[in-house]
Amino acid sequence: MMRNIYKYGILGISLMILNSCIDTLDTRPTTSFDDETVWGSKATVEGFINSTYDAVINSGYAGSGSSISWEARTPNGVLCSQVGEGIDNVATELGLSTGNDWGVNRFGLLRKVNMIITNVQNSSTLNETEKIELKAHGNLMRGMIFFDQARKMGRFVPVKEVFTVENPEAVNIPMTEDVSESYKLIIEDLQIAANDLPIENASGLPTRWAAGVLLSRAALQAYAYTGDASYLDVAITAANDVISNSGVELSNSNGLFNETDLYNPEILWGYYREKENTYVSSFEELMRTYPNVSTDNVINSQSPVALKQANGQTFEGWAIYFPTQDLVDQFLVTDEETGKAMPWYETSQYKNNVTVLDPSSITEAGQVDAYKQVNGDARRIPTPQDLKQLNKSYPTFTRYHQLNKGADRDLSELMYSGRDRRFYTAIVYDKCSWIGETVELNLGGNLSAGVRDKEDGGWYNTTTGYYWRKGNIENPTPRAYHNCQVALHFNIVRLGEAYMNLAEAYLLKHDVPNAVKALNMTRTIHGGLSESTAATEEEAWTDYIRERNCELTNEGGDIYYSYLRWGKYGGYANHGRDAGDIIYDLDRPVYKMSISRDRSKLLVGQMTLNNSAQRKFTEKRYLLPINQSFLNTREAYGLDHVQNKGW
């Protein structure tokens, strides 16, 4: 009996009906079948639905770059390359203009989705129960398309009918008048899906529980952009329904984000790819997170730990995306004396073994550590670049620490031991194991910033002192290179998010006890940490923002859109600023880690390479621009064509 899993690798519609399941393996277009065939049975309708999901998912929810590129626009990540790719210019706003297209024209996809809704409803062969379930898939997909457009641009053309070539004038639909109208339509569609989808489905297809989490997600965004408090009740009701009635519980699995636990029940909806049709080069989350380092590089760098280089060069990716020290700081450490969870630099084990020095005393290249590679190239902490292209509104260096003499652990062991469990599934750090290799990220280390020709990294190797682990494959066979075939999945919806959305909604209702209760579920079960004891709104917001960063980093861009919400709320959600003010954490430089060769000193400093410290957020970025060419076409046809404010 085949496992009931829907995988996206070979897509299309199959009209072969099996006793136990349907394979969607035929790549022929749906137009090769007449309406009676396609819409004549539940099995063939499901085939059409399944093939349409792939396009919807890849238009903002999973797929290449949908996680990693958006994370690079938050304090959690960077895009930085010295060999062509540069930096992410959305984070600096230099790459934003009305020429950008954020998906305003999805009419072809909407036509398919509306065909599902309309043709299922009008079917004379489907029974009423089948109609309700199948139509709900169409509502979910339409709600998802509209939601992705709204969270980016605010307004969209609300196509809810199937138009024909013979009747083009019917497409003279005005865009939604404002964000409020946009979210009204989104919530309507998602509520239908959350009520009518089945409670069980194949691992690659959504259930009412997956729709419920998406509904709670959209409701929070709706509240942030409209101020309509009724959306908070929608978010709470939807999240509680999933938590109380799905029968799914949080687990402490380490394989939710790689190939070792793909079908954990906590993954309410996953995007699954078959090995036969998926290559490392197919996804930015893989190709652009694995470094490219050779044995010759390691020898020249004088690293004491050689790479095994099994089956050829172990790491032969094109890494340009890296996590930051800002993200690493979010993952708390358990104090060995008290059992409490706290920042790594505040634990008793750290303070008892480390002396905190003045970071402003570092003014010259190589002041912390320096040496020369075999070829004579200098490698230093800080590098000359670390003292250039600074954002002078912020400290150049924030931490300068030295290990005490006689300490029985080095700085890396003191920093990275006893962390929140999610740290180890998200980050590749100094002295950890990755793809069978022992990783060195200190000065001169085998995967360090300076291991190749460029002292500050960026030749497809780290620029921050870390690599991403979350979202890539733990054991690519035979190695991490472009042509390696891999089976993988991305999480579209997880149970953990339901608790996060619930906590945020309760905070907005000023219900601190229930908010802390919700965030403590993921904090204790996923993080393995002691409970938050936050008693005030300020404390609860601090713990909640930290918790969401740890729980949902590098998952579908969640953290970017969360920061937009938090900026809209203002107050404790945005460093005490007014609602709708500049978002502090999107308008500042991010930081990197440098560790000395003997791991006795560390320096945390601004990430300055390629002028990347000049991150910027202005109020107009709460909504991205609508593509001007699209608006010009509408104007030519006498349709509304208003651009978003500030663009």
Image (cartoon, rainbow, N blue to C red):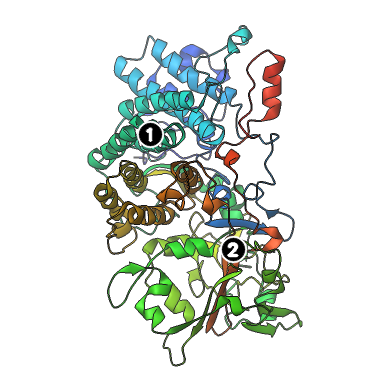
Q: How far, Cα to Cα, is label 2 from label 1? A: 38 Å
Of the pair 476 and 353, the residue shown nearer to us = 353
In the displayed structure, would residue 18 be above or below residue 507?
above
Using a 10 Å C-alpha cutoff, classify the residue at mark 1 as few (fewer than 14 neighbours), some (14 to 19) or many (20 or more): many
Residue at 53% x, 31% y is: 154
Which residue corresponds to the image point at 57% horizontal and 50% vertical from the top-left?
Answer: 73
Between 573 and 94, the one nearer to me in the picture: 573
Question: Which numbered disc covers residue 338?
Answer: none
Task: Using residue 328 as the reference point, say whether residue 632 is left or right of it.
Answer: right
Residue 427, position as x, y percentages in the image: 49, 63
Q: Is residue 101 visible?
A: yes
Where is residue 247? Give x, y as percent: 24, 42
User: Where 631 sits versus 494, above or below?
Assistant: above
In the picture of the structure, the residue carrying the numbered disc 2 is: 394
Type of amino acid under label 1: Leu
Find residue 600 and report its horizontal and vertical position in percent.
52, 84
Q: 160 or 97, which is in the foreground?
A: 97
- The spot of residue 214 in percent (x, y) is 40, 36
Q: Secondary structure at mark 2?
A: loop
For numbered disc 1, what is the local secondary structure?
helix
User: Would you identify the image quadrant in which residue 645 lies?
Assistant: top right
Horizontal arrangement in the rendering, residue 135 relative to residue 148 (left or right): left
| The image quarter in which residue 163 lies | top right
Nearest to N terminus: mark 2 or mark 1: 1
Where, quadrant-wise, is the C terminus in this rendering? top right
Q: Amino acid at mark 2?
A: Tyr
46 or 570, which is in the foreground? Answer: 570
Q: Which mark is residue 215?
A: 1
In which quadrant is the N terminus drawn?
A: top left
Q: Is residue 421 above or below residue 251?
A: below
